[in-house]
Image (cartoon, grey):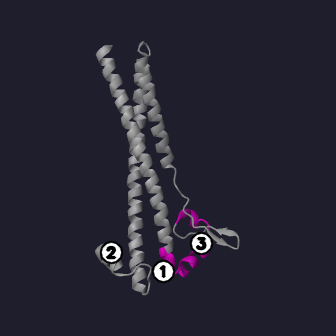
Amino acid sequence: MTKKTIVKELEEKPEGNLETSKDIDIQLSYSHDILDKRYVLYNWLDTKVNLSLAINSALLGFSYILLKNEVGTNLLFIKAMIVLAMTLIGVCIYLCLTLTNPAMKSKIWKRKKDKLITKQPRTSVGIAEFEPDEYFSFLRNLEKPEMLKYNVDQIVKMNAIVIRASKKLKAIVTLSALSLILLLITLIIDYMFL
């Protein structure tokens, strides 16, 4: 079944009506497609974060060398610009490191006789709550609407992770650009006046 077929059939079907097995199969397939796209985007963002971490680490080293070479200079302005650039780079590195910490909080919490149940068959944290035989049984007994519900839950939580990561990545790129501009201005001033 192609993506166009899935979208066409979903558009023709009224919302929330799961009358046939074919309907839920289409929705399950569509939810898998959405979830796959979340993971692809998450991997893309992770690559960009790692690249930013490498670039900012190199900039920090360059800044240190630049500062060390400016020790004899009486221009406090140049030293302050280098220290400010190093501070921005340090913030970027910190943000990158916070994004490399795995986000493994996607549990489904259900209230059952005042006891929270954290078992979720789609996530690492949720699966860890099962014994192997129990997990096998749980998967075999899942109905398609429940599968769809678990997919939707994971889509929403993965999307929140992706949005949070993309916002932090924008901040990282902005701060990296500012620190690079400060370092370039410092080099220009240093070359022209000293």
Q: Quadrant of the C terminus?
A: top left
Q: Amino acid at mark 2?
A: Val
> What residue is shown with label 1?
144
How crowded is the residue under tag 2: few (<14 C-alpha within 10 Å), some, or many (20+)?
few
Residue nearest the observer in this picture, 81 or 16? 16
Spot occupied by residue 78 in the image (x, y as percentages of width and height) = 40, 20
The answer to which quarter of the image holds residue 22 is bottom left
Spot occupied by residue 26 in the image (x, y as percentages of width and height) = 38, 79
Disc on the earlier residue, 2 or 1:
2
Could you tell me which secondary element the residue under label 3 belongs to?
Answer: helix
**Spatial separation of the CA atoms under disc 2 and disc 1:** 19 Å
As displayed, is residue 68 above or below residue 163? above
How crowded is the residue under tag 1: few (<14 C-alpha within 10 Å), some, or many (20+)?
some
Spot occupied by residue 151 in the image (x, y as percentages of width and height) = 47, 70
Q: Is residue 141 magenta?
A: yes
Residue 81 is left or right of residue 133, and the answer is: left
Q: Amino acid at mark 1?
A: Lys
Q: Is residue 8 magenta?
A: no
> What residue is shown with label 2?
7
Spot occupied by residue 126 in the image (x, y as percentages of width and height) = 57, 66
Foreground: disc 2 or disc 1: 2
Q: Residue at x 47, y 64 (%)?
A: 156
Q: Amino acid at mark 3?
A: Pro
- Magenta stretch: dominant secondary structure: helix
Disc on the earlier residue, 1 or 3:
3
Point out the stretch of residues depicted in magenta.
123-148
**Spatial separation of the CA atoms under disc 3 and disc 2:** 36 Å
Residue nearest the observer in this picture, 109 or 101? 109
Residue 77 marker = none
As displayed, is residue 180 above or below residue 35? above
